[in-house]
Structures are given as C-alpha cells and as structure tokens.
Amino acid sequence: MKRILPFAIRPVFTTRCGLKHTRPKSSSARPPQPTTSPHSPWIRVAGSVIHGRGVYARVAIPAGTRVIEYTGERITKAEARRREVQRLARASVGNDGCVTIFELNQRYDLDARDTDSPAKLINHSCAPNCRAENIRGHIWIVARCDIPAGEELTFDYGFPLSEWRLHPCRCGEPSCPGYIVNSGQRWRLRRLLRAEKRRASNSGRGSAVPQVEPAVPAGSQET
Ligand SMILES: [Zn+2]
C-alpha cells in the first residue's frame, strides 16, 4: 500500500463545497507572507478531528500554492515491497501501521517514515482541499482551492479499490463512502457496499460489511 497520485490532475480547483475557484487573478495579488518555519511557512501541526495529528493552514492559503513538499528516502520498488511487509506486520500487532510510502515514478518510491517532515501527517479526505502533484520529480502538496487559516489540510491518498477494507475513512464528508479509496473508484465501492448490504439483508445476517479496526493506532490517518 502506498499513496499514489490521482489518475488525472486537472487545473481546476474545487472547494470542499464543490464550488469552483480559479487561480489568483493577477500576480499583483501576492499571497500573504507568513513567518518561515523549517518545513513550510504555510502550516502548523495540531491534533486532528480526522485522525491523530493533522496539518492546518496557519494563514490563508491561495489556490494553487505549493504548500509543502512530501519528502522522504528514495527507495526502489523492491525495497518498498519489503517495507510494506514490515508495515503490515507492525500493524497486525497494534504498532505503527502508518503508510508513509508515496509512489514517485515507475522506478522509485519515497518513504517519509524516518523524516520529521509534517507532510506525512496530512490526513486523507474524500473532499480534499489539496492535491498531490509530481512537479519535476518532486511530490508537492498543492492547494486545490483558497484555504482559510485554521482549516485542516487534506488530500486524496489515492488508495486502490482492491484494499478498501483495510482503510476505514473518518473524514466526515457527506460524500465519504466510509473507506479510503481513490476518487475515481469510489462509485464502484458504493456499488459494492450496496450489494453487500442487500446480500446481508436477504440472508438476515445484518450488515455484511466487516467492522475493520483501524490499522493505525497513532499518527496520521492510515498513513
Ligand atoms: Zn472519507
């Protein structure tokens, strides 16, 4: 399991309310210049209502801003698979099961596990206000819309449908299907959940959807 970029990155910013925003109209409208922090001047870290610790806008962030780079150790795909086995083993005994590996390209991934960058703490949301973007070989978390100060930053982790049961979602958005699955596959998940519910009611067993325990005891949501 790793975080992946969305299938298509569109140059249109959609707020969590579904309203379309555009980039700042002119370069004269300079973004505010907050005080600098070691990793990003735009953020602060605090407890999250979604999960564990989260990342918040410390000042208003204009749409299109590169908020923070997702940094980590560059590892091969084989090493990523080896670490995934280790992660699952840790998670199975209630230890840190955070997914910190991000797909970088066809040859390499990034593992943020041993970094102190707060980018790895950004939670998933089914209606995110940020997106992950690969810009010349660097993964950036970019604001999808104008984000007011104090709002928690989120992006779509892009997890595949095949592993939906492992990743319950607590983002609380009205559109949330209850599990972390990339936006392009969520309609399939909803169809699958409806089918399971029908089967359960037909067999009189109650809900057939397993109550999956969170794999992550602390830290960022399912990261
Ligand atoms: Zn959700």
Image: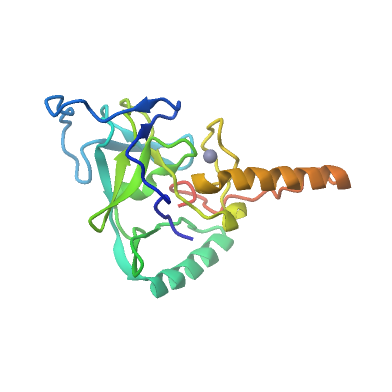
Vertically, is 130 above or below 134? above
Q: Is residue 204 visible?
A: no
Q: Is residue 126 visible?
A: yes
* Residue drawn at the location 16% of the way across and 33% of the way down: 35
- Expressed as whole percent of the image width and height from the top left, the position of residue 39 reads 22, 46
- Expressed as whole percent of the image width and height from the top left, the position of residue 208 reads 76, 48
Residue 60: quadrant of the picture: top left
* Residue drawn at the location 61% of the way across and 47% of the way down: 188
* Residue drawn at the location 31% of the way across and 32% of the way down: 57
- Expressed as whole percent of the image width and height from the top left, the position of residue 14 reads 39, 32
Asked whether 107 or 58 is in front, the reply is: 107
| Drawn side of residue 85 relative to residue 32, left or right | right
Asked whether 130 or 152 is in front, the reply is: 130
Count every numbered label the image shows and give the total. 0
| Drawn side of residue 107 relative to residue 178, left or right | left
Asked whether 152 or 175 is in front, the reply is: 175
- Expressed as whole percent of the image width and height from the top left, the position of residue 144 reads 34, 36
Vertically, is 92 above or below 209? below
**Residue extending furthest left?**
28
Colour approach in the figure = rainbow
Vertically, is 108 above or below 20? below
Asked whether 81 or 187 is in front, the reply is: 187
